[in-house]
Image (cartoon, rainbow, N blue to C red):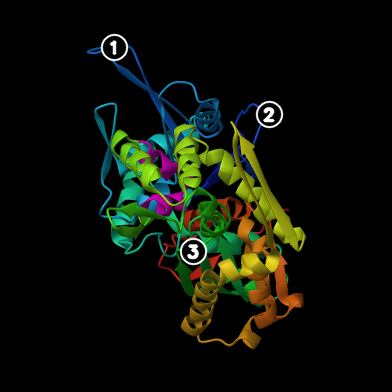
């Protein structure tokens, strides 16, 4: 029987883990066209049915939302990366088919779909630990606002009391479940929107594994940022970035806001509004690179953003295994091609790597430790496989101290252990000393 739940609500993907009475941790699965999956895409798709005044707004989430978005049927609204707006005071609501949806309602709707097949688990009021980043994404993130919104979203989704826990703390619990000796561990959790770090001291007083949280830091730079750097350098110049246009007797730069929207592929739909499309067509006629601007217009009109980012993700993956990679995108007559070396890519993300490194160093400073005081580094999340990211830690701690876990499941699995532990010992997120239950692999 299930005794606790761990929920890793991520920017790009979400995972749910269940701790059983016998100590096993299992992952929830959901149906998809490819069969059962244990990773649920953090996405919603809305559409309307009927005519006024009897218009009904329908929605799906996860794999089904992605399938509908890619099918390109109808005028639905695809919504992704909602987690990144939790800490933004500038974003409080959006309108979908004349109906207002607050950010809490959007996240709550997603969480409700994520947990739709939980059966009686929510009704049983089981202990639940839900992940949160150490630092929320955004330019000026309001941490208190984000926590309030996230807590309300879980309430709207039908959950009772939900304990929020730092995501790297969940990863730390998963790493530590079979430790036999005392260790000081730096946990690095790389998500889609943030990179988070925790320093945890694991000890065994009276034979019980106990965790002392020494430091938590984070930065709003992660996998999505790396994707954008590739798009910005490989793709955007082919779609008019850096070009100029003539206005009377002046040569002016192409508006920067257009290519800035490529930072998140789902934001490209914001450009596909009559006012912007009219402006782009006008710019194309005056552009010094009209073919590139026409290609940009066609790209936006055909909603090819997701297909492009899939191709970019493949390029990034190739660069984790090889020194060079090739972008070969061709859809509906829109061709975007390029070759990139690992060295090029590392140059593109140099500033991001520096920020990640600074956040890692800040964790050590906060903990009052030097690299030699750290016994192990546990890295999780897809970006942990990027060689330049891994090298940051190898150079600082040595390869023999680096450990990796399941890229997407470690946090949720550990959060299930956190939930059970807090229920047993009454520990809160602010508590620095937590006892961990032993569990089988």
Q: Is residue 188 above or below residue 263?
A: below
**On the image, numbered disc 3 is attached to which residue?**
221
Q: Label 2 neighbourhood size at 10 Å, few (<14), some (14-19), many (20+)?
A: few
Is residue 404 rendered to the left or right of residue 241? Answer: right
* Residue reaching furthest to the left: 53
User: Mark 3 to mark 2: distance in Å?
Assistant: 32 Å
**Cα separation between marks 2 and 1:** 35 Å
**Residues at circles 2 and 1 in contact by the CB criterion of under 8 Å:** no
Q: Is residue 267 magenta?
A: yes
Using residue 79 as the reference point, say whether residue 141 is left or right of it: left
Percent of width and height locating residue 133: 45, 60
- Classify 10 Å Cα crowding around label 1: few (below 14), some (14-19), many (20 and above): few
Say if mark 3 contacts mark 1, CB within 8 Å: no
Report the span colored magenta. Answer: 257-272
The reply to whether residue 404 is in sight is yes
User: Is any atom of residue 154 visible in this view?
Assistant: no
Look at 76% across and 59% down and name the residue there.
Answer: 321
């Amino acid at each position: 029987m299930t005794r606790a739940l761990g929920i890793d609500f991520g920017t790009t993907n979400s995972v749910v883990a269940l701790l059983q009475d016998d100590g096993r941790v299992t992952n929830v699965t959901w149906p998809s066209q490819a069969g059962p999956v244990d990773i649920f895409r953090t996405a919603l798709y809305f559409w309307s049915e009927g005519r006024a005044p009897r218009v009904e707004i329908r929605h799906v989430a996860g794999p089904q939302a992605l399938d509908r978005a890619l099918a390109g049927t109808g005028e639905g609204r695809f919504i992704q990366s909602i987690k990144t707006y939790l800490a933004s005071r500038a974003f409080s609501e959006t309108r979908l088919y004349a109906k207002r949806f607050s950010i809490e309602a959007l996240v709550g709707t997603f969480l409700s779909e994520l947990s739709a097949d939980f059966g009686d688990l929510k009704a049983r009021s089981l202990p639940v630990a839900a992940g949160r980043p150490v630092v929320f994404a955004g330019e000026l993130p309001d941490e208190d606002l984000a926590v309030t919104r996230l807590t309300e979203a879980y309430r709207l989704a039908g959950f009772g009391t939900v304990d929020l826990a730092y995501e790297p703390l969940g990863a730390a619990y998963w790493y530590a479940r079979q430790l036999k000796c005392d260790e000081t561990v730096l946990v690095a959790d790389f998500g889609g929107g943030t990179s988070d770090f925790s320093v945890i001291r694991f000890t065994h007083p009276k034979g019980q594994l106990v965790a002392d949280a020494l430091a938590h830091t984070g930065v709003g730079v992660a996998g999505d940022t790396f994707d954008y750097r590739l798009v910005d350098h490989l793709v955007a110049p082919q779609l008019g970035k850096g070009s100029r246009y003539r206005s009377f007797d002046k040569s002016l730069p192409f508006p920067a806001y257009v290519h800035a929207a490529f930072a998140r592929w789902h934001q490209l739909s914001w450009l596909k509004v009559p006012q912007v499309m009219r402006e782009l067509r006008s710019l194309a006629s005056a552009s010094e690179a009209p073919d590139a601007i026409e290609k940009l217009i066609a790209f936006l009109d055909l909603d090819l953003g997701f297909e492009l980012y899939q191709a970019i993700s493949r390029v990034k993956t190739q660069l984790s295994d090889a020194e060079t990679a090739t972008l070969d995108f061709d859809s509906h007559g829109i061709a975007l091609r390029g070759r990139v070396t690992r060295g090029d890519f590392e140059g593109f993300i140099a500033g991001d790597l520096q920020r990640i490194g600074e956040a890692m160093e800040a964790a050590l400073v906060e903990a009052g430790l030097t690299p030699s005081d750290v016994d192990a580094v546990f890295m999780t999340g897809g970006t942990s496989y990027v060689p330049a990211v891994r090298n940051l830690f190898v150079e600082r701690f040595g390869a023999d101290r680096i450990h990796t876990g399941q890229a997407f499941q470690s946090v949720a699995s550990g959060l299930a252990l956190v939930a059970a532990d807090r229920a047993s010992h009454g520990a809160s997120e602010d508590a620095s000393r937590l006892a961990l239950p032993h569990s089988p692999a």
